[in-house]
Amino acid sequence: MASSTVLRREPAVCLKDVKDAATASDNSDSDGEKDLLGLEDFEIIKTIGTGTFGRVCLCRDKSTLEYGAMKILAIGDVIRLKQVEHVKNEKNILAEIRHPFIVNLRWHWHDQSYLYMLFDYVCGGELFSYLRNAGRFSNSTGNFYTAEIVLALEYLHQQNVVYRDLKPENLLLDRDGHLKITDFGFAKKLADRTWTLCGTPEYLAPEIIQSKGHNKAVDWWALGVLVYEMLAGYPPFFDDNPFGIYEKILAGKIEWPRQLDPVAKDLVKKLLVQDRTKRLGNMKNGAEDVKRHRWFKGIDWVDVFHRKLKPPIVPRVSYDGDTRNFDEYPEADWKSAPVVGDTERKLFDDF
């Protein structure tokens, strides 16, 4: 790819949805907030993101005046697009996990037309936007963000969760410049393997494309793609057609930019291994093998976890509800979705 311009990808899709025995159990919010709040307790301020069947809006709690990001999904569209299990997985998984580099789910609810999930508002915007503006990141900048992602993936895998949608568009920067992984629509609790073909084409591991069944190793492959994209300015596998991308991934041929740091290149090579049993992060020592790689030499992982390292980018933010770091979106009448019937609504009784 000649250009180093980062292009926004189409929303990730699932081409097949196969349920396995591993389903996440429902876990209501520990602080009881779910039972105490209703939609009327929030002021919906502005759309800060849109997707295939919903949007994310900046909102404010009328009582505490705290800002939040509310994900609003039309039930009818979720059912029509066969995303019921994915949406349930997202809510169930996020209700169970807490990590400094993962978005925090504060509340979830549904009415006759919509599903609602309230998150802490991460006001720094998408890492994608900063990468697009910079063209590519320096070696030290890419290293900083990769370290925080490694700890988040290690934690998720310890919880038997595979994320399956790692990309710059799903990484937010908080006010201080630290990362938060967002959008768990394709995340899943695993007992062993799953066969669902999910994700963004440029980031799919070979075993997903080949429908061989996959596990947490796909996240380490995606990390390799992400490190390459951050340092090169474009992904290692690119084509105008998704099937062209799949062919290039399966062929495994990568063009290496001259400016790529040789130690970073070594890490990417070890993450982008076709045989997942030999892929860094998926062998006997798991994430420890990634953390011990030479590219992270000198990093104190305890300091990383406690957010003690100085972020290379500090977003411009004037106040907690500042939206300057997000793109503008049309304020369509999102309240116009039809009321669904009792049968459809019962699918989300535990939401």
Image: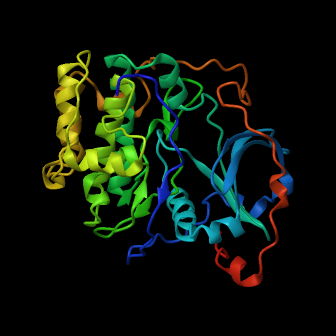
Task: Specify whether 89 is left or right of 77.
Answer: left
Which residue is rendered at x = 32% and y = 50% of the image? 246
Task: Specify whether 76 is left or right of 98.
Answer: right
Image height of 291 relative to 29, above or below: above
Which residue is rendered at x = 23% and y = 16% of the image? 258
Q: Nearer the viewer, residue 229 or 297?
A: 229
Q: Point out residue 143 in the picture as x, y percentages from the top left corner.
A: 33, 25
Image height of 257 relative to 80, above or below: above
Q: Nearer the viewer, residue 130 or 240?
A: 240
Task: Specify whether 235 is left or right of 130.
Answer: left
The image quadrant that residue 52 belongs to is bottom right
Which residue is rendered at x = 28% and y = 49% of the image? 247
Q: Point out residue 331 in the picture as x, y percentages from the top left corner.
A: 81, 42
Q: Point out residue 288 in the picture as x, y percentages from the top left corner.
A: 21, 42
Give the total of numbered labels.
Answer: 0
Image height of 228 relative to 59, above or below: above
Task: Specify whether 159 is left or right of 328.
Answer: left
Q: Point out residue 213 in the picture as x, y percentages from the top left corner.
A: 28, 66
**Residue pushed farthest bottom?**
343
Q: Nearer the viewer, residue 108 or 262?
A: 262
The reply to whether residue 154 is visible in this rendering is no
The image quadrant that residue 211 belongs to is bottom left
Which quadrant of the rendered structure holds the C terminus?
bottom right
